């Protein structure tokens, strides 16, 4: 488990939200200044080129800056997904095609007032969380849970993102989601879908049952949001109303809240205030919120708030990793296949 030195050291990389905020400020300033000083009226295409060009510049800088920091860390390693296939439609265009679909869709999300408001709340929350961590870094970096957790599903899933180190986490600098996991289902070749991959029902994890990782009480439910409008092209749903899509938050213990996101519309059964048991059905995996393909996002946090909570490291019990049974609670990380070890009871 990471110690406080690792935690403090790796708070330095720049977060994904800075390019969005800086683009809004600088591109708007350029736009207004040119109108005021040069009497130049921007057309819609030129305005888009202005914003998109500046965003790409900042995104490249942040990626390069973070990479230069992380390569100094001996734990740095290539993400295994580099060797996994892209969804079929975008893969047919070429491996660099996501650069022209993903980044424009992320940029377009800032014109969505719902997502912009949530991104600003995340930015504010990041500052608050950073202040909390600085006062007691050991408390969070070496956190030990009060309860035991199982995987939030039964079948075998692949860990696309997630782990307890900067090298394995895809959101280490987003402090709420530092130890978050993105789970998908994949075949032997690591493809996450059958057929063409341009329909949500092509994806193996879509519609799969999501279960409670531990006993607890439901404290928040969002259940009425539709799936994303584009699948198989690495496009983030910039029209979504919630970053996390349909989601559920469960208080598993004092200071331990499970966050289950991107569920299927109207599939969540428990209501706020309900008590749930470990392994109880919660809802179905979907494609709601910000994401490029159906998956389950799961993480543990220390308060109910999605924006102001500190992400907590978590260990799981009763599971198989890459087909091998693990008896004791353990840390899981990206690139491995995990499954809950169901114990058959005999009468």
Image (cartoon, rainbow, N blue to C red):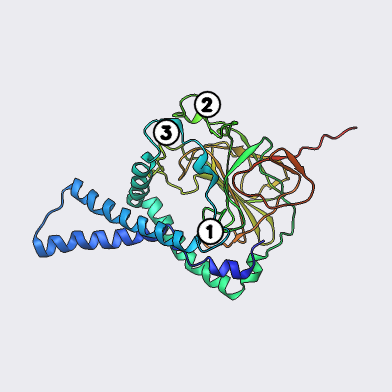
**Can you tell which of label 3 and label 2 is closer to the viewer?**
3
Contact? badges 2 and 1 (CB < 8 Å): no
* Distance from Cα at disc 3 to Cα at disc 2: 14 Å
Secondary structure beneath label 2: loop
**In terms of sequence position, does the residue under pointer 3 or pointer 2 come before the other?**
3
Whether residue 222 is visible, yes or no, is no
| Residue at image mark 3 | 91
Q: Are marks 1 and 3 in contact (CB under 8 Å)?
A: no
**Mark 2 neighbour class, 10 Å CA radius: few under 14, some 14 to 19, many 20 or more:** some
Question: What is the crowding at mark 1: few (fewer than 14 residues within 10 Å), some, or many (at least 20)?
Answer: many
Please state the horizontal and vertical placement of residue 303, each as a whole percent of the image: 60, 61
Q: Position of residue 118 (x, y in %)?
A: 43, 55
Q: Earlier in the sequence, mark 1 or mark 3?
A: 3
**Foreground: disc 1 or disc 3:** 3
* Separation of residues labelled 2 and 1 (CA atoms): 31 Å
Picture residue at 64% right of the left edge, 58% below the top: 313
Quadrant where the C terminus is found in the figure = top right
Residue at label 1? 172
User: Percent x, y for residue 219?
Assistant: 61, 52
Q: Write the residue at 42% across / 39% down.
A: 234
Q: Say above or below: 31 vs 317.
A: below
Q: Secondary structure at mark 1?
A: loop
Disc 2 target residue: 194
Q: Nearer the viewer, residue 22 or 220?
A: 22
**Which circle's residue, 2 or 1, is located before the other in the chain?**
1
Tag 3 secondary structure: helix
């Amino acid at each position: 488990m990471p110690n406080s030195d690792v935690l403090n050291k790796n708070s330095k990389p720049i977060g994904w939200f800075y390019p969005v905020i800086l683009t809004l400020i600088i591109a708007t300033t350029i736009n207004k200044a040119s109108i005021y000083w040069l009497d130049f009226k921007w057309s819609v295409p030129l305005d888009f080129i202005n914003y998109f060009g500046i965003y790409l510049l900042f995104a490249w800088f942040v990626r390069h800056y973070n990479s230069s920091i992380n390569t100094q860390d001996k734990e740095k390693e290539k993400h295994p997904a580099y060797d996994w296939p892209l969804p079929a439609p975008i893969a047919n265009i070429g491996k660099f095609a996501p650069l022209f679909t993903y980044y424009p869709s992320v940029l377009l999300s800032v014109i969505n007032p719902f997502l912009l408001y949530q991104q600003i709340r995340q930015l504010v929350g990041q500052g608050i969380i950073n202040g909390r961590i600085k006062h007691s870094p050991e408390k969070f970096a070496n956190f030990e849970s009060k309860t035991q957790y199982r995987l939030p599903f039964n079948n075998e899933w692949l860990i696309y993102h997630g782990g307890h180190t900067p090298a394995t986490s895809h959101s280490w600098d987003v402090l709420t989601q530092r130890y978050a996991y993105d789970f998908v289902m994949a075949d032997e070749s690591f493809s996450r879908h059958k057929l063409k991959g341009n329909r949500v029902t092509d994806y193996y994890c879509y519609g799969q049952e999501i279960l409670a990782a531990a006993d607890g009480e439901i404290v928040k439910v969002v259940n009425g949001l539709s799936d994303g409008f584009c699948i198989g092209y690495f496009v983030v749903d910039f029209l979504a109303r919630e970053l996390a899509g349909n989601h559920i938050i469960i208080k598993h213990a004092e200071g331990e809240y499970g966050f289950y996101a991107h569920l299927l519309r109207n599939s969540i059964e428990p209501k706020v205030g309900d008590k749930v048991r470990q392994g109880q059905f919660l809802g179905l995996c979907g494609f709601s919120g910000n994401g490029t393909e159906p998956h389950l996002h799961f993480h543990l946090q220390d308060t109910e708030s999605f924006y102001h909570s500190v992400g907590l490291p978590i260990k799981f019990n009763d599971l198989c990793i890459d087909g091998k049974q693990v008896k004791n609670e353990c840390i899981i990380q990206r690139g491995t296949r995990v499954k809950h070890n169901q114990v058959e009871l005999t009468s």
